[in-house]
């Protein structure tokens, strides 16, 4: 199993990225982490977008199989299919935050998620990008 519950924190990553599928990561790490930051209406919109455009496409794909060119091709295909600039930008943000920011920090040393924080609405600190 790729993660375990911790008495102090939400999730502790164990092992290499070849043990995680995108779907498991989104459900067990990404969404629980960001739900704390998002207000209710934002959570509903973001979760729907991630599920509809990303999780249904990549749910069984291993995290270590993603490449920059492959992700760009995916976004290009979505744009060609007629999605709005705004939706493409949000998908890019979702992929960027999940695969290039949050995931590497979690697996770097098996550090618990609670050791990572964000600034913003619920913390009283300036907003992150």
Image (cartoon, rainbow, N blue to C red):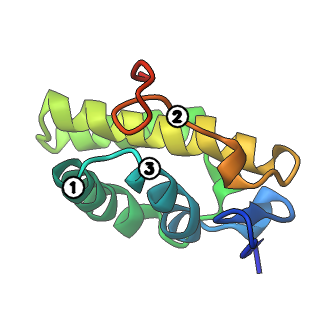
Query: Which residue is disc 3 drawn over?
Result: 34
Q: Which residue is at a point 14% across and 41% down the rendered structure image?
A: 83
Query: Which residue is disc 1 drawn over?
Result: 40
Number of on-image labels:
3
Q: Are marks 3 and 2 in contact (CB under 8 Å)?
A: no
Within 10 Å of disc 3 (Cα), the crowding (few <14, some 14-19, many 20+) is: some
Q: Quadrant of the N terminus?
A: bottom right
Ranked by sequence position, the earlier of labels 1 and 2 is: 1
Asked where in the image residue 124 lies, by quadrant, the reply is top left
Query: Which residue is disc 2 drawn over?
Result: 118
Task: Check disc 1 and report its element: helix, strand or loop.
Answer: helix
Task: Check disc 3 and report its element: helix, strand or loop.
Answer: helix
Q: Nearer the viewer, residue 85 or 25?
A: 25
Q: Which residue is at a point 69% across and 62% down the rendered structure image?
A: 9
Q: Nearer the viewer, residue 128 or 61?
A: 128
Q: Which residue is at a point 16% across and 45% down the rendered structure image?
A: 81
Q: Are marks 1 and 2 in contact (CB under 8 Å)?
A: no
**Residue at the limit of the structure toward the bottom, as seen here:** 1
Image coords of residue 39 (percent x, y): 25, 48
**Residue at the limit of the structure toward the front, as seen here:** 124
Within 10 Å of disc 2 (Cα), the crowding (few <14, some 14-19, many 20+) is: some
> Does 4 sit above or below residue 25?
below
Q: In the figure, is residue 48 to the left or right of 105? A: left
Ranked by sequence position, the earlier of labels 3 and 2 is: 3
User: Rounded to the nearest whole Å, what is the CA distance between mark 1 and mark 2?
Assistant: 17 Å
User: Can you see residue 67?
Assistant: no
Q: Nearer the viewer, residue 103 or 111?
A: 111
User: Rounded to the nearest whole Å, what is the CA distance between mark 3 and mark 2?
Assistant: 9 Å
Asked where in the image residue 3 lies, by quadrant, the reply is bottom right
């Amino acid at each position: 199993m790729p993660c375990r519950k911790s008495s102090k924190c939400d999730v502790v990553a164990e092992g290499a990225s070849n043990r995680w599928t995108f779907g498991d990561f989104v459900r067990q790490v990404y969404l629980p982490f960001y739900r704390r930051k998002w207000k209710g209406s934002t959570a509903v919109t973001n979760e729907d977008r991630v599920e509809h455009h990303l999780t249904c496409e990549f749910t069984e794909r291993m995290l270590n199989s993603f490449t920059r060119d492959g992700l760009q091709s995916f976004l290009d295909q979505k744009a060609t299919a007629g999605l709005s600039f705004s939706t493409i930008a949000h998908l890019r943000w979702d992929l960027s935050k999940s695969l290039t920011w949050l995931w590497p920090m979690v697996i770097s040393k098996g550090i618990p998620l609670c050791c990572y924080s964000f600034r913003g609405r619920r913390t009283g600190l300036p907003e992150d990008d």
